[in-house]
Structure formats: C-alpha cells, structure tokens
Image (tube, rainbow, N blue to C red):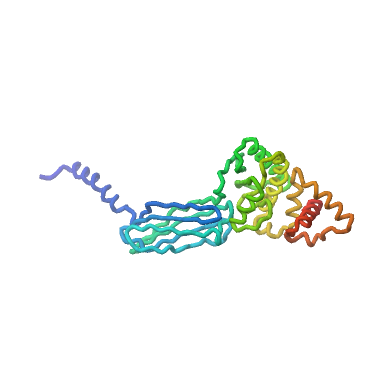
Amino acid sequence: MRAPARVLVLLVCLLLPAGLLAQDQPPISVVQLSAYYSFGQQAAFSIEAEAEADVTALYLYLDVEGVERVDVIPVPIEPGPSVQASFQRDLRGDPFPPFGRVTWWWEVEDAVGHHLTTAHTLLQYVDNRFDWQTRSSGSLHIHSVVDDPVYLQAALDVARAGLSRIEQVLGGLGQGDIDVYLYPSEEELRAALELAGREWVGGQARPELGVVLVAVPRDEAYLARMERVIPHELSHLLVYRALGAGGYAHVPAWLDEGFATMNEVRPDPNQAVLLEQAWRRGQLIPLADLCAPFPADPDVALLSYAESASL
C-alpha cells in the first residue's frame, strides 16, 4: 500500500536535518583554551583539542604589540584523537612590553589535512603583582595601587586638565585609550620596569601602547607630584600620536622633553636655579648636544630639562 505523499514529505523533513547535522560536525574541535602569566616571570598558553582523525600538529601564534613580526611556535605533541599541550615563555629572558597587549591564537592540524584556527584572544600584560584600582573618564583610565577615591579622582582631574592643555597646542589627535598607571614608589616602578626588561628612567611613557607609568607616593605632596609627572609623560604620548611612529623617531630630545617639561603644572624649582647658574658661569649645554637622549647624570639631566623647557 502506497503511503500518502504528505507522510513521505514529513519523513524526509524529520530525517534530513539529522543527516545534515552529522555531516556538519567539525573534523577538529577545541575543548579548552587558557592563558596566564606571572609578571616578569613566565607566561603559559594551553590547549586541548580533539579530531576524528588524529591531531598531528599544533602551532601557537603570538602577536606582541609594538613588534612587527608574529611569532609562530610549533608545539610538539604525540599525535592522537585527543591532545593536550602548552607552551611556556620565559619572560625574564624574552619579556613582553610592560602593559602592552598580546594577541594569541592556535592552529590545529589533523592527519588528513584539516586545519582549525581558534579565535584571536587578547592578553593585557599588566603588572599582576598588584591589585589595581581604576577610575575612568571616556578613553582616559587611571590605575592605582592606592584604594583611595580622593587620590584616584585627583589623578584623573590632573590628567584630563593636562590633556586639554596639550591638545590646544597640538590640535586634534584622534581617538585611542590612554592608561595611566600610578605606582606607590619609585622603587616599585623601577622593579616593574626591570622585571619587564626595560631601562629605569623614572616616569615612562609607552606612547606606542597608549600607556604612561609614573611613581606617585600617597603622601602629603602627592598632588604636586601628580601635577608634575602626569602632564609630562602625557606630552610624550600625544606628540607621538600627532607625528606617528616615523615622525616621533626624529624629534630631537630637547623638543620632546622641553615641551613635556613646559606642560608640567608645578615644574621642579631647582631647574630655574640651575639654569641661571649655568648661564652666569657660561656652562650652558650646546643645543646640538641636547638633540640626543639626555645623560644619566642627575645634575646634567636636570640642566638639560631646564634648557629644553626654556628653548
């Protein structure tokens, strides 16, 4: 007896999706992904993957902000239908840029030539030795170890005022987040920079990352220090954004540092005294010598800043 046509149609509708679903099962699947790090010590990236045919190859991709190349790392495994693997990077010898961004993903290959690439994931490489408190205004973010609303708001106000003054000189500078990290002491900031493989230079702007690092102890003079160091480092960042990486590389030190010093709300009073003394003694530093990075000697460096600001 022949079944009615409507029954056959119903059977096809019931059976067809199940067959399609079976065919749509991916040949490779990722069960788990993870990434963690200890600042200045080690970073680890892990994966667990499965395949109908054996998983035969794993590649980890690391795209580090500020580095032109993408690292492609073959991670050795024993081929099989289910594999677990991880890669450890020694950050003491091969550090990430402090407070920079690292984009990572995996590529998985099976025995019959199928490939799967995981989604690109962002790792923000902050100093996770500390519990950072954050206060934001638009694209400006203040991060501090000090959990004090008055202190945090003061830093945010100083930064906003500094950005406004600098932008009036340089003009519109486009969009982009700015992160200001306030360390509780110069010793702890120095340790963070050295852990990340950077030279200690006091405060530091990482303009290519949109990051400023400064030391502002929570004491009775913290506001005066904020008004000096925060606008100074923000100046470097905004000059970089105004000129781009190529242009910024050719800015003489006296212009970059002089403009930054000029933007300090409360400049170091010792600079004016030192400048006056050097002028009277005929010991001013020639302008040509101020085109290169300033020396480490504190007295010569202070005079270099003072002359540059005056210029």
Q: Residue 180, can we see it?
A: no
Q: Residue at x 32, y 59 (%)?
A: 81
Q: Is residue 291 visible?
A: yes
Which residue reaches farthest left? 1
Q: In this orientation, which residue lies closer to the viewer: 272 or 103?
A: 272
Q: Position of residue 238 (x, y in %)?
A: 68, 49
Q: Quadrant of residue 216?
A: top right
Hey, which residue is sitting farthest top in the picture? 150
The residue drawn where x is 56% and y is 46% is 130
- Tell me where residue 51 sits by quadrant: bottom left
Total tally of numbered discs in the picture: 0
77 to the left or right of 157:
left
Identified at 77% across, 46% down, the residue is 267
Viewer-proximal residue, 283 or 129? Answer: 129
15 left or right of 304? left
Residue 255 % position (x, y): 75, 55
Specify the farthest residue to the right: 280
Q: Quadrant of the N terminus?
A: top left
